[in-house]
Image: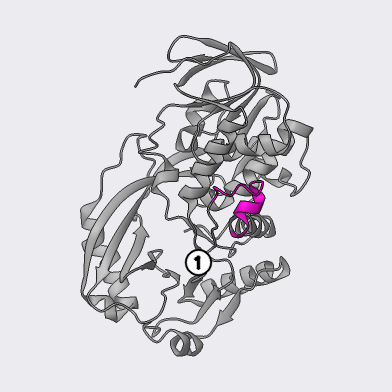
Amino acid sequence: MTTESPLESSYDIVIIGGAIMGASTAWNLTEQGFDGRVLVVERDPTYEFASTTHTNSCMRQQFSTALNVQISQYAADFVNNIRERMGGDERVPELAVQSFGYMYLADSEGFADVLRRNVQVQNNAGAATQLMSAEEIKATYPFYNVDDVLLGSINRINEGYWDGNAVFQWWRRQSRERGVEYVENEVVAINHAGQRVVSVVLASGEVISCGQVVNATGPRAAKTAEMVGITLPIEPRKRFSWVFKADKPLDQDLPLTVDPSGVHFRENGGGTYQAGGHTELDPAAEFDDFNMEHSLWEEHIWPTIATRVPQFEAIKVISEWTGHYAMNTLDQNAIVGPHTEVENFHFINGFSGHGLQQSPAMGRGLAEYLTHGGYRSLDLSALGYERIALGKAYVEDAVI
């Protein structure tokens, strides 16, 4: 890798990782009026292998905890009002969530009960999720095979695709214009004394003093935390994606369909669709392992799609890729905020596949904490490190 040297030898905040979470934190710091120098250190500014780049860029409110519902509600509001949220900057494009919805399908009473419980949580938090019987699903979406379906849930308001890349790019652009410094480099060591980090060591050799450090390194979060002697239950998990073209496209939008098998597929536009899934055995991956499992499509993904939507018997894959989830193996939920002992080391990690849609609220919350010493809008303390230290899970059931 090439390296750039920072302009200064000391910063008030060093953010390790410049993908979606690092960018959101940096931009939100400028929104909070943080009065100090901020450095973002990114090892690969092309973001070729970042989870941000490999995302399906979708948003949903169908979670099992009210907090996660609220986090996505804020994200939808941010995207739908992005120009206003970004100071009325006329260069910022007008965006909107393309609300084709998520359709969860249950084929057992146990799974149906999970949907019922989750919908109650979502409705209580203000989400518009509805339960649908198999007959209702078939009447609304006649292309589905629902022979084995007992119940479904869907929300057609602020659930669907959004342009995450545009948001990411504008966070980076505006934060730079407001004084945040980005460098292509890598943090290879973190020096700490007692209960505080004092500096970070860069691959280029510089030792950079810092007041606060943010771990925004995605699937590498545990490796970064180890530099301070902290254990994180986060590991890379491979997730595979395909874009396919149908010989006979559907005549209506396809919700992001979460099949009971775990395979998911959705509308992509122009007669194309996107699918995702993972292998039955789901071990931790190496950081640089982005190899496709080519047999997975033929043996599992395509048969599942064709069974659920018989009109997709004849389809052709036009692109495919592998990405990594930053999987929190304790409870599949984010870890955000300060460490319980190393008080100036902060987390924004472990999103387990729903990070992009959570980035607006998470960056805002962490920026509030860094600027004001506490959360001022949405209380994210339930997602703090304390539960990790205690091994006390705060479980999110609705993980795809």
The image quadrant of residue 305 is bottom left
Q: Give percent across and percent down for residue 322.
A: 32, 48
Tag 1 secondary structure: loop
204 part of magenta stretch: no
Q: Give the side of residue 374 with respect to residue 223, left or right.
A: right
Say whether residue 130 is visible. Answer: yes
The residue beneath circle 1 is 98
Residue 165 pos. (x, y %): 46, 48
Q: Which residues are magenta?
A: 80-92
Report the amino acid beneath label 1.
Gln
52 versus 187 height, above or below: below
- Which residue lies at the image location 48% right of the left edge and 90% below the top edge? 135
Vertical placement of residue 147 versus 213, above or below: below
- On screen, residue 396 versus residue 54, left or right, reads right
Q: Looking at the picture, tell me which residue is in the foreground, 237 or 336.
A: 336
- Quadrant location of residue 174? top right
